[in-house]
Image: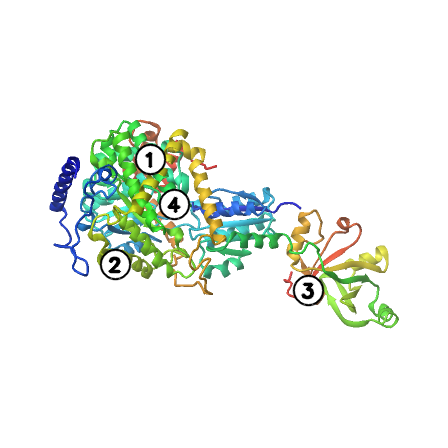
Amino acid sequence: MQKIRVLVAKPGLDGHDRGALVIAQGLRDHGMEVIYTGLRQSPAQIAKAAIQEDVDVVGLSSLSGAHRTLFPKVIEELQSMNAGDIPVIGGGVIPSEDIPFLIEKGINRVFTSGSTIEELANYINQLVVPANSQVAKKISHIGIAVRSIKNTLPFYTETLGLSLEGLEEVESESVNVAFLKIGDSRFELLEPTSETSPIHTFLEKRGEGIHHIALDVEDIETRIRHLSKNGIQFINTEPKLGAHQTSIAFMHPKSAHGVLFELCEEGGGEEA
Amino acid sequence: MGINQKEIEKKWKDSVEENLKRFPERKETFQTSSEIEVQGLYYPENDSNYLEKLGYPGEYPYTRGIQSTMYRSKYWTMRQYAGFGSAKETNKRFRYLLEQGQTGLSVAFDLPTQIGYDSDDSMSEGEVGRVGVAIDTLHDMEELLEQIPLDRVSTSMTINAPASVLLCMYIAVGEKQGVSTDKLTGTIQNDILKEYIARGTYIFPPKPSMRLITNIFEYCQQYVPKFNTISISGYHIREAGSTAVQEAAFTIANGMAYVDAAIESGLEVDSFAPRLAFFFNAHNNFFEEIAKFRAARRVWARIMKEHYQAKNPKSWKLRFHTQTGGSTLTAQQPDNNIVRVTLQALAAVLGGTQSLHTNSRDEALALPTEESARIALRTQQIIAHESGVADTVDPLGGSYYVEELTDKIESEIEGYLNQIRDIGGAVAAIEEGYMQREIHRTAYETQKRIEKEEEIIVGLNKFKIEEEVNPELLKVDEELERQQKSKLRKIKNERDNDLVDSTLKQLKWAASQNGENLMPYILNAVKAYASVGEICNVLRKEFGEYRSN
């Protein structure tokens, strides 16, 4: 597997880089590739370096008290360069009361004085590489395109003897969905509600049949980032809201040998 | 007792008498709580090594201290580093500290000032007034020093790359107060080499930086003779992670580079060496710290006398300020830091420091609050007035352990000095990254030892408690940056801008002429209310900027 790439950066004018240097070395000893920017970097320079170096994570260090201004600026710069998906973590002399503010501004986590390199390395590992190398533990559901739920439902409930869990409209996809439980998984019957629905297009091209397979994942954003990093294309890289308040994202079938896979994180998923 | 020692002992006793005329002892008699009399000095008789290695205090090689009576006459200067936000706010803190019995001022500047950017420069964003006071023009300096009598208070300024500019502002304020330059006392840090090594507030490359420094030496020797023109600093080298030995060795190596540069520029060693001062750290390993101070004094004395052939004994004396170790403080259980600071301060006093800053308990979290700063000052006052350690000179002199440690540290310092000499001196060693690598190696080893719990930090990796680390912290008003910018705009509108332009043009010319001393030109620009950024930008254009690799 590729080494995790980390950019360690010193925003602003602060010259105290003992912490930054020790961390750079420590992460290297944990098998990561570390790029250190040196002193006096502007937020724009840091964002640019992060993109050029194609890093997985950016670590900011500041001891001068300028973190409230400069850390959020780095996030803004990354976003303006379409690299808002690179996670940013911070460290240094940062009062605990400032931490919620920084998290709200998009910093993933703040490591203050007394944190160990071990903790930091573990955190970065789980931030960048999902803890489990198996993407999903189970199939969340199999999506099946139908022209009419009403006409199809008897086959599933009567012939196959499955129980109907519920019906729901998913606006983001312009579909009505019926859920049928089978063990820990489900069938999802998808019926287009308009001609702009991707299911409508699918039916026109191929007729009724299996549309996609959804994999049940944890921490969908990390998964997307990690799979993208390994060359998998996504139809949507930002997770969107699926049925049952799930966060979902579709892999492009070109990247998956003709199968449309959906990543699906149940509950607690952030709204897209 | 050998004849030699008798003679020297007499000489020392004479110098004690001499010293007491100027600085009488604090008390008529010194006693322990059991009324046992405490002598000024305890020393061996019939010890052939004594004169060679230790000597009497105030006598070469100064292992036991640079004055014959040390704190029996006068305590060290209690000098707390302070400065935050606006000049007005800092002025208030200074006056508070002076009322509380502090005996000298120490100014912390914000990073834009230290790196020669005005508050309205885009580089300054978020940093204005953060780690110290923001000074853009003479106007800010006037506010900073308002109602502080510069003929009676000595001021230490932690300023390096633009030290010449801030010193000129200080001189200009003195002039307005009617204090002539020869009455001004204080210190500018002015130590650029350790900025390249450890602290990072450099502007120009080493060569023009060394020129600015020797210009200051020359100017002050003539006009500001009581000002310490440099404070050669090991403090930041230590904070960056070095050992005690590396701290002392690299600092002395840097000191030698300044002496070399000044001599090369045509100055005579005894004309500037008496105004060189040092600045060391005090960490937790109690006896090692004491031995470090004693060894550093002995090494410097030998270098100045033997290597540079200085004739004036004042040139041989290593005078130093100490600050307790910021990096030893923990954000966890911050009150424990008071105890660490006490031990470190005690080591500095037993090591014979001339002045001392004690850190505040909350410095691992933010700038100190007024209450924390007061406890820090009280710590020094308790050591001075209650512990009795100041009642005899060098009380640990003659301890088998401390003397052995002093010798060992001295020889390790010399080992490093030889290595640096082989590389071609401190400047070459810095450019090559040698010192930086050595310090980084030590810093990383330390971190690993702490994580493996081979080194115990109380409250951090042992004896931990669940705590909300949320004591009351000092906040710098976020509005300040905006206010400082508008203040600067106002000054730039109101001053005589033709005069500013012409003084800056003259400065530019002088900078291009190697033989010119830049100080008078900078002083003229400062008096015309040219800003720190404007002056430094002129010099940036002429000198270029340093980039670390």
Residue under pointer 4: B238
Q: Chain of mark 4?
A: B
Q: Are marks 1 and 3 in contact (CB under 8 Å)?
A: no
Residue under pointer 3: A266
Rendering coords of residue B373 (x, y %) = 31, 58
Tell me which residue sits at (30%, 27%) in the image: B264
Q: Are marks 4 and 2 in contact (CB under 8 Å)?
A: no
Distance of label 1 from label 3 (alpha carbons): 67 Å
- Give the secondary structure at mark 1: helix
Q: Residues within 10 Å of mark 4 (few under 14, many from 20)?
A: many
| Residue B279 in view here | no
Q: Earlier in the sequence, mark 2 or mark 1?
A: 2
Distance of label 2 from label 3 (alpha carbons): 63 Å
- Give the secondary structure at mark 4: helix
Check chain identity for marks 2 and 1: say if they share one: yes
- Give the secondary structure at mark 3: loop
Q: Earlier in the sequence, mark 4 or mark 2?
A: 4
Distance of label 4 from label 2 (alpha carbons): 26 Å
- In the image, taking residue B543 as reference, residue B33 lies left or right, namely left
Distance of label 4 from label 3 (alpha carbons): 52 Å
Q: Which mark is residue B504?
A: 1
Rendering coords of residue B279 (x, y %) = 31, 44
Three-letter amino acid code of the residue under disc 3: Glu
Between circles 1 and 4, the one closer to the viewer is 4
The answer to which of B435 and A206 lies nearer the viewer is: B435
Q: Chain of mark 2?
A: B
Three-letter amino acid code of the residue under disc 4: Arg
Q: Residues within 10 Å of mark 1 (few under 14, many from 20)?
A: many
Q: Which mark is residue B382?
A: 2
Check chain identity for marks 1 and 3: say if they share one: no
Q: Is residue B431 above or below residue B39?
A: above
